[in-house]
């Protein structure tokens, strides 16, 4: 592989592997919590940290991490106070972050501020060996915390009120999640960019959510998708000369559209098949019941009837009895929109 | 003597005022519930019955008086995991897919501490809880593939998995088909027989009437009745005492959703005393 001969490319691919794994691992909780844009906001805040790093000649990864984590904790505390101004407070913090970053960067010595684009949208040539080490530490911490606290983060993201009622430490867990998001934002700043990282947190989760059956499966799938689009996009940007962040995100969006279309077509086909059977059944009205001539198959909380090889699950509608098709294998009813028309 | 009576008491409200921010919704409530009792909290929409239950869970603020849950002031109850909660919600909400096992498994978390991982004992409790609500064969199915009534039962199972000493349920039968209501009544009868204290907030006891022995009626934030469930029925039936429940139909066993009744707003406007 030609692109692996270059040191900068090896580092960029390593960085993209790590961010591809970590971003969806925190992103699924943000999607669950309907806080998809938190990563975006923290990306803004991290920019101020980057600027401070450049101005003081410190490694910008470190200062960005500090700024983003502080911003994350602040956001959670503001949200927990729960006053109406919370929304406005967030806006002030987010836009203050990006404005502060831009202004501070303009004060930097000539020549330095020009790589603002690289921080915002990613550039594969910028990852240093020091960055890779820092990213590795961040990745291990992020994945470690998700592994340790994942079920608690799930509980709080899923139903915060229930979590509070049964005594889970809601605020600390929310702060931990926000801090994880902040760390992941920083992880992204070389290959994906601070303005696009949110996409890598959300899009793989959005794709996985369409096909996953369990939360755990969805989480794993999202991470796998994240790695694939991140590494592929980084490699592609080497050949096309486009910013890596934009390339990765466009790939992720293409995948999202593809899977959405496939799932829509699958559901529509299932519904059409259901509709056809409804017509067939309407042609010979028959109510299943004891001794109706069809084999009764107990199924959970109801009884299915074996009707020429497919299972009928009765349920009552406004107009009478309607039968869903229950396949024997997975026991899930086929979506039945037609009955309502 | 004091100790044993405290140990016997699941709930004690003494002049309790409960609300949000600084707005009092339930005022000066006095109520003592012994362990193992099964209490119905009845009242019309907007009467404050849900706020009362949220006060027991630490979800609404205690603005005055005392609310003690399982022997400790509600704000200082260490082991909240001893309390089970079924929220007033028709479906499991999450944006991400989750299986029945995963949702119900959340019920065990308060018992595991911050870092504990579920062991065989926890897995058994989850399986038992799911079995108790009659969804054993759906354990690995995504909750989104379940009907609304089944999803409500998943939320009940989540509360049961905690093996709570006190179980608070908010409108568990609202919008649930008759079959699921019967099933729920059966579950609650078994839970109650085990000694769990039940607090069920509802405006239609339906089949649950067989389980709930005692009732309080909340009207405009005040407790206006405390006694046998059947007495609440008489109260509503005779109409000797005015409360919003009259317009809602009787607050009685067997009250059904499909009976016509005025829109909640109409009730609230006429009785809007706040």
Image: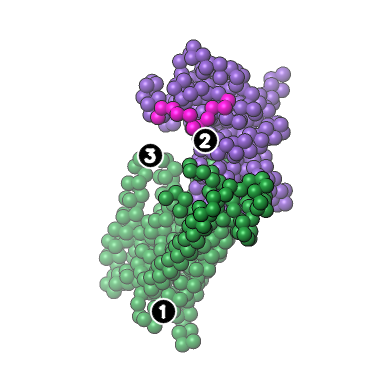
Chain colours: A green, B purple
- B168 is within the stretch colored magenta: no
Query: In this rendering, does residue B203 appear at all?
Result: yes
> For the residues carrying marks 1 and 3, which lies nearer the camera in this image?
1
Q: Chain of mark 2?
A: B
- Which disc, if any, is residue A83? 3
Query: Measured from the top left, where is residue A8 in percent x and y?
Result: 44, 80
Asked if residue B53 is positioned above or below residue A146 in the image, the reply reads above
> For the residues carrying marks 3 and 2, which lies nearer the camera in this image?
2
Label 2 in the same subunit as label 1? no
> Whole-Å distance between the Cαs marked 1 and 3?
46 Å
Is there a contact, CB below 8 Å, between mark 1 and mark 3? Answer: no
Mark 1: secondary structure: helix
Query: Measured from the top left, where is residue B254 in percent x and y?
Result: 57, 27
Which stretch appears magenta? Answer: B253-263
**Residue in the image at 54% along x and 65% along y:** A221
Query: Measured from the top left, where is residue A4 in percent x and y?
Result: 48, 84
**Residue in the image at 27% along x and 65% along y:** A107
Circle 1 residue: A236
**Placement of the C terminus of chain B among the 4 image quadrants:** top left
Q: Chain of mark 3?
A: A
**Residue in the image at 61% along x and 48% along y:** A288
Q: Main secondary structure of the magenta part?
A: loop
How crowded is the residue under tag 2: few (<14 C-alpha within 10 Å), some, or many (20+)?
A: many
Mark 2: secondary structure: loop
> Whole-Å distance between the Cαs marked 2 and 1?
55 Å
**Residue in the image at 60% along x and 21% along y:** B229
- Which disc, if any, is residue B152? none
Mark 3: secondary structure: loop
Circle 2 residue: B174
């Amino acid at each position: 592989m030609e692109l692996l001969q270059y040191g900068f490319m090896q580092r960029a691919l390593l960085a993209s592997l790590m961010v591809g794994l970590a971003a969806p691992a925190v992103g699924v909780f943000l999607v669950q919590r309907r806080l998809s844009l938190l990563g975006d906001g923290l990306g803004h805040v991290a920019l101020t940290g980057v600027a401070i790093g450049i101005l003081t000649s410190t490694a910008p990864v470190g200062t960005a991490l500090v700024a983003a984590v502080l911003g994350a904790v602040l956001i959670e505390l503001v949200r927990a106070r729960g006053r109406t101004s919370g929304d406005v407070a967030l806006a002030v913090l987010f836009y203050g972050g990006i404005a502060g970053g831009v202004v501070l960067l303009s004060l930097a010595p000539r020549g330095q501020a020009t790589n603002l684009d690289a921080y915002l949208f990613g550039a594969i040539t910028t990852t240093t060996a020091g960055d890779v080490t820092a990213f590795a530490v961040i990745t291990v911490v992020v994945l470690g915390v998700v592994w340790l606290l994942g079920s608690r983060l799930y509980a709080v993201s899923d139903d915060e009120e229930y979590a509070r009622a049964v005594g889970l430490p809601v605020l600390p867990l929310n702060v931990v999640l926000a801090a994880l998001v902040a760390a992941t934002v920083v992880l992204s700043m070389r290959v994906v960019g601070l303005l696009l990282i949110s996409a890598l947190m959300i899009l793989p989760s959005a794709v996985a959510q369409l096909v996953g059956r369990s939360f755990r499966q969805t989480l794993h799938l999202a991470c796998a998708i994240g790695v694939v689009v991140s590494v592929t996009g980084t490699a592609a940007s080497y050949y096309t000369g486009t910013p890596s962040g934009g390339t990765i995100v466009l790939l992720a969006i293409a995948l999202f559209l593809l899977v959405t279309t496939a799932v829509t077509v699958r559901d529509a086909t299932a519904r059409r098949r259901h509709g056809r059977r409804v017509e067939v059944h309407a042609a010979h009205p028959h109510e299943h019941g004891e001794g109706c001539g069809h084999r009764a198959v107990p199924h959970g909380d109801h009884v299915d009837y074996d009707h020429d090889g497919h299972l009928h699950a009765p349920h009552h509608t406004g107009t009478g009895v309607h039968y869903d098709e229950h396949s024997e294998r997975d026991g899930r009813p086929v979506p039945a929109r037609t009955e309502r028309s | 003597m004091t100790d044993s009576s405290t140990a016997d008491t699941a709930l004690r409200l003494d002049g309790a005022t409960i609300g949000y921010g600084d707005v009092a919704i339930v005022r000066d409530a006095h109520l003592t519930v012994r362990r193992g009792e099964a209490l119905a909290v009845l009242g019309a929409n907007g009467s404050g019955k849900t706020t009362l239950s949220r006060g027991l869970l630490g979800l609404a603020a205690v603005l005055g008086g005392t609310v003690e849950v399982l022997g400790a002031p509600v704000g200082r109850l260490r082991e909240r995991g001893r309390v089970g909660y079924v929220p007033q919600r028709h479906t499991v909400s999450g944006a991400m897919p989750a299986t029945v096992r995963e949702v119900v498994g959340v019920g065990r978390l308060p018992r595991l501490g911050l870092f504990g991982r579920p062991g065989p004992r926890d897995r058994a409790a989850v399986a038992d809880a799911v079995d108790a609500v009659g969804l054993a064969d759906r354990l690995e199915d995504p909750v989104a593939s379940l009907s609304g009534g089944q999803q409500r039962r998943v939320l009940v199972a989540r509360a049961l998995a905690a093996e709570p000493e006190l179980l608070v349920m908010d409108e568990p039968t609202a919008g649930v088909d008759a079959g699921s209501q019967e099933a729920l009544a059966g579950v609650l009868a078994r839970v109650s027989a085990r000694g769990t204290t039940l607090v069920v907030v509802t405006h239609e006891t339906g089949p649950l009437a067989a389980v709930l022995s005692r009732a309080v009626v909340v009207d405009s934030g005040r407790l206006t009745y405390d006694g046998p469930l059947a007495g609440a029925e008489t109260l509503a039936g005779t109409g000797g005492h005015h409360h919003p429940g009259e317009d809602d139909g009787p607050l009685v066993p067997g009250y059904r959703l499909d009976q016509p009744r005025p829109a909640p707003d109409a009730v609230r406007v006429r009785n809007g005393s706040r």
